Image (cartoon, rainbow, N blue to C red):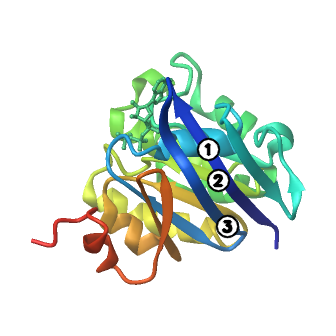
């Protein structure tokens, strides 16, 4: 089992400190839930791990080997917060490019794929597109998966169907997931990390989410 380590991340925008002491570990087989208020730096952190945002300082490694760009060699895959798939392409064609051949049977068995295989991306609803984007990333070749707001735009019933897929995927991959639907994050995650004031706080008891001012407690 490989371990992704993220240590000592520092990020500033225009002299404003966003991240200053960020530390987390994710081993294949684990789902790490990342929570935090709007603008605290969750998306920035995922981009830094993936390699598309330069930090002022960061140490990212897999099995203690320093990783400069997580996206090289399919080591890390990333679901961005906003839609990323090209509109005019047929879903089955796109899936063949992204999905790991070993996960093809599992992916094509998904009702979401079976209903839409012959359609083009722009023919999907916002929620269907979000689910497809997430499923493609989850079934990609990468050992580690970063998901930025996969539950946003997903109806409650579909979120329920979706959580077991994330859990099943975590049997062979490490997953870091963030979303404002914190109850889904609490349910799907093995460990929860709160990002507040630029620092990661490892949450052992959900009441700490109130103590640290993430939940109101009312
Ligand atoms: N390219 C940029 N230039 C300047 N400031 C930026 C840039 N990108 C993000 N920021 C700022 O950095 C902070 C962190 O942004 P980020 O998108 O990482 O937060 P977030 O926790 O993902 O927020 P949300 O939950 O609202 O999506 C915010 O205050 C944002 O305004």
Which residue position holds label 2? 145
Earlier-in-chain disc, 1 versus 2? 1
- Mark 2 crowdedness (10 Å alpha carbons): few <14, some 14-19, many ≥20: many
Earlier-in-chain disc, 3 versus 2? 3
Which residue position holds label 3? 26
Q: Is residue 192 above or below residue 93?
A: below
- Mark 3 crowdedness (10 Å alpha carbons): few <14, some 14-19, many ≥20: many
Name the side, left or right, on which 163 lies relative to 71: left
The percent coordinates of residue 129 (x first, y second) are 43, 36
Q: Are marks 3 and 2 in contact (CB under 8 Å)?
A: no
The kind of secondary structure element at disc 2 is strand
The kind of secondary structure element at disc 1 is strand
Which residue position holds label 1? 10
- Mark 1 crowdedness (10 Å alpha carbons): few <14, some 14-19, many ≥20: many
The percent coordinates of residue 39 (x first, y second) are 37, 40
- Residue lying at 16% horizontally and 72% vertically, measured from the top left: 217
Q: Is residue 62 above or below residue 9?
A: below
Residue that sits furthest to the left in the current view:
218
- Tell me: is circle 2 under 8 Å from ligand 1: no
Q: Are marks 1 and 2 in contact (CB under 8 Å)?
A: no
Look at the image and tell me in which quarter the N terminus lies: bottom right
């Amino acid at each position: 089992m490989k371990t992704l380590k993220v240590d000592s991340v520092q990020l500033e925008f225009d002299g404003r400190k966003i991240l200053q002491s960020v530390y987390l570990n994710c081993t294949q087989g684990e789902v790490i839930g990342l929570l935090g208020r709007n603008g605290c730096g969750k998306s920035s952190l995922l981009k830094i791990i993936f390699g598309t945002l330069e930090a002022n300082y960061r140490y990212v490694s897999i099995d203690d080997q320093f990783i400069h760009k997580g996206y090289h060699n399919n080591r890390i895959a990333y679901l961005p917060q906003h839609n990323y798939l090209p509109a005019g392409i047929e879903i089955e064609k796109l899936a063949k490019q992204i999905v790991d051949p070993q996960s093809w049977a599992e992916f094509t068995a998904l009702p979401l794929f079976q209903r839409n295989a012959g359609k083009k991306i722009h023919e999907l609803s916002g929620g269907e597109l979000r689910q497809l984007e997430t499923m493609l990333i989850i079934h990609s070749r990468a050992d580690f998966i970063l998901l930025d707001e996969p539950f946003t735009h997903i109806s409650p019933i579909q979120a329920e169907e979706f959580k077991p897929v994330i859990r099943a995927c975590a049997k062979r991959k490490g997953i870091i997931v963030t979303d404002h639907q914190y109850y889904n994050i609490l349910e799907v995650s093995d460990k929860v990390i709160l990002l507040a004031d630029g620092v990661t706080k490892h949450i052992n008891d959900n009441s700490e989410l109130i103590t640290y001012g993430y939940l109101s407690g009312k």
